[in-house]
Amino acid sequence: MGLERDVLLKRLLTIVLSISMIALGFIALRFGGALSQEGNPLPILISISKLEFTGSDYEQFSESDQEIRYVSENNGGSRYDIVKGFMKDRGWNFKEQMGSGLLFEKDKQTTIVETRQFSKYYFLWDFPIEEVS
């Protein structure tokens, strides 16, 4: 009886380890070199999971005294529409794109939302925290 239990536990452990290895392999293939470009990738990966499971347009993954950082899905040419809509909801008008920065105006003030590609499928964006309110 004890031998059967040991065999079952070994099989279960093998299955769990196999599934874990497959999941890690999937993450490595999907994000490749992007995993090391922003320091600790865990908060970004957690936010990407929320994006995938909730269907939202963006997820916050970091906040400091200076900026709030979000991750969004890369939808090709219209990927920045999410950022533009987010800012428009807060009273900011889009003026122009300058490289990877998006320039917005509100009451004679300007701010730039910085964007950068995280992987083929996702991009990151951040802006000064005092500009959000």
Image (tube, rainbow, N blue to C red):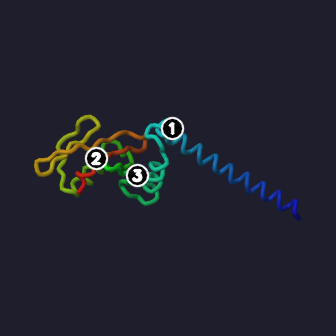
Please identify the quarter of the rendering in which residue 24 is found: top right
Residue located farthest toward the front when viewing the structure as drawn: 65
* Amino acid type at image mark 2: Phe
Residue at the spot of label 3:
61
Residue at the spot of label 1:
32
Q: Secondary structure at mark 2?
A: strand
Q: Earlier in the sequence, mark 3 or mark 1?
A: 1
Vertical position of residue 99 compared to residue 84: above or below: above
Q: Secondary structure at mark 3?
A: strand
Horizontal relation, residue 131 to residue 16: left or right: left
The CA distance from mark 3 to mark 1 is 19 Å
> What residue appears at the point 87 percent right and 62 percent down from the top-left corner?
2
* Residue 23: % across, % down: 59, 48
Q: Considering the image in quadrants, where does the N terminus appear?
A: bottom right
Horizontal relation, residue 45 to residue 21: left or right: left
Q: Considering the image in quadrants, where does the C terminus appear?
A: bottom left
* Amino acid type at image mark 1: Gly
Q: Which mark is residue 5?
A: none
* Amino acid type at image mark 3: Phe
> What residue appears at the point 36 percent right and 51 percent down from the top-left corner?
63
Horizontal relation, residue 52 to residue 94: left or right: right
Residue located farthest toward the left when viewing the structure as drawn: 108
Vertical position of residue 52 compared to residue 35: above or below: below
Residue at the spot of label 2:
127
